[in-house]
Image (spheres, rainbow, N blue to C red):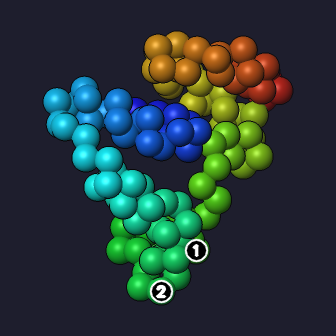
Amino acid sequence: MRYEDMVADSALAFRNLLAFLGVPVDDAKLQHTLKATSFEAMQKQERETGFHERPSKMEQFFATGTAGGWRDKLTPAQVARIRAAFLPALEKWYPEMLDETARIAEGAA
């Protein structure tokens, strides 16, 4: 399950996951769950009660909630290292990112 797909259409992504798992979909429960676990709801919860899983050096775990934020955060060298380490995963799960990551990684040379 890709984060990008959850951001683009969370209801569809979770319906597909539940179908894959063979779990019947209860529309009311799904809508309630999606609302309760929306990025905005998780940010609010983190502000009000904290987030135990947040690494101690990280200021905020639920920061932006956008797909593709790596483009603004990672250096070309970081993209090159990630691409080299995870190329088979990129080829299988993110083929649309192959050209872009290659182009960015070239800037590391």
**Could you say which is closer to the camera, residue 50 or residue 106?**
50
Relative image position of residue 71 (x, y in whole percent) = 73, 40
Amino acid carrying mark 1 in the image? Glu
Residue displayed at 58% across by 39% down: 8
**Could you say which is closer to the camera, residue 60 or residue 105?**
60
Residue displayed at 50% across by 25% down: 85
First in residue order: circle 2 vs circle 1: 2
Other residues around mark 2 within 10 Å, as few (<14) / some (14–19) / many (≥20): few
Relative image position of residue 65 (x, y in whole percent) = 60, 55
Say whether residue 69 is left or right of residue 103: left
Relative image position of residue 27 (x, y in whole percent) = 32, 47
Say whether residue 94 is left or right of residue 101: left
Say whether residue 68 is left or right of residue 56: right
* C-alpha distance separating marks 2 and 1: 14 Å
Q: Which residue is mark 1?
A: 59
Residue displayed at 61% across by 64% down: 63
**Could you say which is closer to the camera, residue 41 or residue 76?**
41
Q: Which residue is mark 2?
A: 48
Q: Report if the CB atoms under discs 2 and 1 are less than 8 Å apart.
A: no
Residue displayed at 64% across by 17% down: 96
Relative image position of residue 69 (x, y in whole percent) = 68, 46
Q: Quadrant of the N terminus?
A: top left
Residue 94 drawn above or below residue 29: above
Q: State the residue lying farthest toward the bottom.
A: 48
Other residues around mark 1 within 10 Å, as few (<14) / some (14–19) / many (≥20): few
Whether residue 58 is visible here, answered yes or no, is no
